[in-house]
Amino acid sequence: MSVESTAMAFSTITGSVSLVLSDAPVAILYHFPVNQAHDGVLRTLDFICDTVDTSSASKPGKGKRKSSLKSHGNHSYFLSGGESFLVKMVAPLSLLLIVAVTIRAALYRSSLAELIAERVEVVSPITAWKRVIEGLALLDLGVSPYSGDVFHETPLIIYLFHFLVDYAEITFMLADVITAVALYMAVKDFNKQVFRKQKFSVEAERYPADCLELIRSPTEMFYIPLKVAMFYLLNPFTILSCVAKSTCGLNNAVLSLFILTTIKGNVLLSAIFLCLATYQSIYPLTLCAPAMLYLMQHQYVPVNPRRAAFWWFLVQYLFMYLGSLFVIVCLSFFLLGSWDFLPSVYGFILSVPDLTPNIGLFWYFFAEMFEHFRLFFLCVFQINVFFYTVPLCIKLKDQPVFLMFMQLAVISIFKSYPTVGDTALYLAFLPVWSHLHRCECLLHTWVRSGSTGSTGNIFLVSCVLLACSALFPVLWHLWIYAGSANSNFYYAITLLFNVAQILLVSDYFYAFLRREHHLTAGLYLKKKDGSEATLVLK
Amino acid sequence: MGLLSDPNRRRALINLLTRLNAPICALCYFAGVCWFMGLAFEPFTLRTYMSENAMGSTMVEERFPSGERALATGKEFAAHKKKVGGMPVDWLVKTMQARGLEVFTQSFSRTLPFPDENKERYIVKGTNVYGILRAPRAPRTEALVLSAPCSPGDNNNQAVGLLLGLAHYFRSQVFWAKDIIFLVNEHDLIGMQAWLESYHHTNTTGMDWSPLQGRGGSIQAALSLELSSDVITSLDIILEGLNGQLPNLDLANLFYAFCQKIGVLCTIQGRLQRNDWDSVSGYSHAVQTMMLMVMKQASGRPWGDHGLFLRYHIEAATIKGINSFRQYKTDVTTVGRLLEGMFRKLNNLLERLHQSYFFYLMPSLSHFVSIGYYMPAFGLLAVILLLRALDLWVQLVSPPAVAVDGVGDVAQSSPGVLSVLTPLVISHLTGAALYILPTRFQEIAVEHFPVSETEAVVLTVIAVYTAGLALPHNTHRLLSGEGTEQGWRVLKLVAVLYLAVLLGCTALINFSLGFILALTLVPVAAFVTPHVPKTLSAVVLVILSPAFTLLFSVFFFQELEEMPVSFQDGWLLYLSVISQGILDHHLYGSLVYPLIALMVYPCWLLFWNILFWK
């Protein structure tokens, strides 16, 4: 069977390793003269504090320049909120929630729900609702739900649904709503901080004078939280996942609450939610690092291993995290009266015994593999998820939220039983980084350092993602029902899907680093000989 | 990563692609068509060969002796059929039992959504009779099926006679390792559908049938027999099944191998193969044979009774006896021997046929074109869509004028979700109306207009289709005011990508349909903008729309079949093809009609919409 596709998968993975591993991806090609010839701080402030009223948002290019005095008054509501905020943001958000819930409720009632619940792209052996029902039935019979090889969710989930099984649809819709609202609030808070930080930097004239265009305005940032909520709630992936009653929706809710509490700076809750997420699927373990980095910055603890405060904070956080993990695991033990769930949940996640096809990279590999290599490759594949944490932490230690996004993406690509629900969570963050597109466009216009910037790939990548999503069911049909295609066809698409995701994430990573670099080094990069320099990802 | 992340090289590539977009697109289209035409050229095709070891190397000896007796049985069957005025169930049961089979009957009934005027049926009631020859040498876990339809009139009597003769002969042999099911189905595909659904305990089309009383093992392969004369000149094999699905190529190979061995003329698409591939007429013969296959496959309908087996993962083909004016005739004994040989080889199978190709086109029975060879033809057409999309994307992303303030830039590049969403939704609603209305409103139409039900359905289809042309391009103005220059680009980008994904998926499931649609829709997608001359483009757009594609296909198919029709007859044929398409969907679950109505037509409407963008 196809050696080529195996080799291809390898090159993909190793390619991505080298991509992230080459630690300083931005090779700075040469020094940059300080270009003071631009307008001064006045224009900066004017630009940043641009008015937020809708007229300027909907009618571009008219009346841009307003006095900075007036705009100060306006932009204060962005920071503090008030009457108009309620009307402007809460109303669309509730409308969005209503639309999203309606779509889901309609789909639950249609005949599609059954079909969707069977799709391997949407449910994994862990998250399938069918299996949860089976586990509940076993529990009701007084048998351990983990006897047999059907149920692999955690004990807390099964006890949750022990009470909520009749309200499952509402629970899942609620989980999606919670996720969306939590992401909304988290991103709003995050944007506020970004803006505040930027304002201070501008006032302190920390940015080079020529990259004013890279600075973000409140107008563009105003709708981002709403867009994030929309990206999550109206994403077909999320809808499918919710309609299939995949427990992935609950995991996403826990993760988003973790993100919210982290961004709000609540150490204890952050640790507790992270522990819940870890308890659910192990992999969120790696989110520990960005959470700690963020909280340290939030509490003005220096990120410096030589300082005692750093270690003290680390110990504190880990104590809370591991302590609550311990409590939850013990609670599960007492609920269930046995340790059955440990091998059945975590052993199942880590040793990947179920090779049902899914959108991940594991199943085909381990179906093809000789048994005696299994352990080795299992380690290689599983390490993939945890591996990128260290280099990414080093590179992005000042941008923990971006790091969190990267980690979420890495988890959802490399985890052992990925579903489209996992993908949906990190895709929801894309609007937060939408300024990277604009930044690339500007770079293109002024610096001519790349035709469409590195986010130009994003077009290609989204086409591929789109095509793959359509091809999954088609090739599944050809393989399983028509019997005319075979597993290679399906795996080829899986592979393409994952390559596209990797490219997407690495593009964002590159664009992000590039923007940061320009913010410190100026927009006009010159080589030593005075010609224009370009940044290259190597 | 180099090409993707190095801005200079990528810029060079993208510049090249955008500057030379139109010539590259034209070149790709031309190359795609040439590639496709080249497929029928013999040096570019592969010779068929038997992949399945279980069927290749083993020897079987055919000894079926009693052709004359089979013909006599056939005559008896004909007499009883005439007497009963339909399926002579009692006689068949008695005869099969006399031949030592376990005999069962199954009754079914089905009301068609509207009368089928071609076959003159509306409320269908019938009975299938089948006898199972239990395998003496193996556990009864697998089965083979030989079926013959009980057709109205004098057709297929010989087929039933031969079926009974073979049953008698097979009964006396001891080497069967698989159950053999002899099935006589009434009302051709409807009866077959009822029997197969009942055999597999599914009900996909809401038909009423009585459950089967006896079953064999899981069916491995099936042959359907059509024979209407005592002697034949050649045997034709029909492969195209529901939704363009084809059986494993080994089944065709098996048929070809036995025809060679026994010395029967064999054809595909009713065409003999010729040896003069290097002459123009030889090449055009091969092209015509292949085009016939493409047209039949694209229609998505089962072209013989075997067509429904394929859905259940059962390899099946129809073998049809043809009696033409040729001198050399073959008698029924020989046909019986051929079938005996094929069944004995199939009996040797250790697993389902899976070694050979499932995706292929056949320019002649001895040559085939596999998926790897024909997909590039489609790929070249699909690349055009991607190139256009890239071009549009570059136009959209690169700021039109140097936008000094970033805010203006952002607002410029997002022309409002509504202006894109509105045409999208309206087109799809039109498509949904095209799908739902015709069958729903036939009663009302019949009440108010002097037409029959079938005419009502077909005319409603045409009416909705035409009404759709007037609808969408006026509506976007109602909701979102004037369309912007960016607006249509975004809409076109969406439409082009949509079309690319749609055609790609279609081509994977049914290459022929995907290719024919691509052939007409890709040029539309490539050239349409609001700035081309309106009237001329509108005419071109309409001519290249799915409905006209179907019309041309009807005429083209008649040309290929060497039965050219006048325009009047062609039009009537066209109407009947539409009604057949809808019937196929409702009766057997063919996907072509919903695909066209719900996806392709709305997609085409998007381009129509772009042309009239204001």
Image (cartoon, coloured by chain):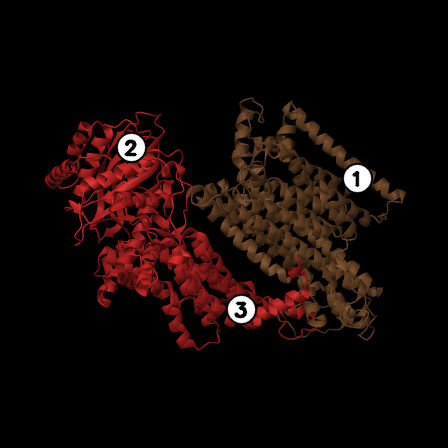
Chain colours: A brown, B red
Residues at marks 3 and 2, CA–CA distance in whole angstroms: 61 Å
The furthest residue to the bottom: B533
Query: Label 3, on which residue?
Result: B489
Judging depth in this view, the residue of B209 and A448 nearest the camera is A448
Asked if the residue under mark 2 is in contact with the one under mark 3, i.e. CB atoms within 8 Å, the reply is no
Assign a secondary structure to mark 1.
Answer: helix
Number of numbered discs: 3
Q: What is the quadrant of residue A60 in the picture?
A: bottom right
The answer to whether B219 appears left or right of B183 in the picture is right
Same chain for mark 2 and mark 1? The answer is no
Give the residue type that dot 1 points to. Tyr
Which residue occupies 54% across, 48% down?
Answer: A492
Q: Residue A406: percent from the left, percent from the top?
A: 69, 50
Q: Which mark is residue A317?
A: 1
The residue at which mark 2 appears reads as: B180
Where is residue A402 drawn, in percent x and y?
72, 52
Q: Amino acid at mark 2?
A: Ile
Residue B570 versus residue B536 in the image, above or below: above
N-term-proximal mark, 3 vs 2: 2
Q: Which-is-in-front pick, marks 2 and 1?
A: 2
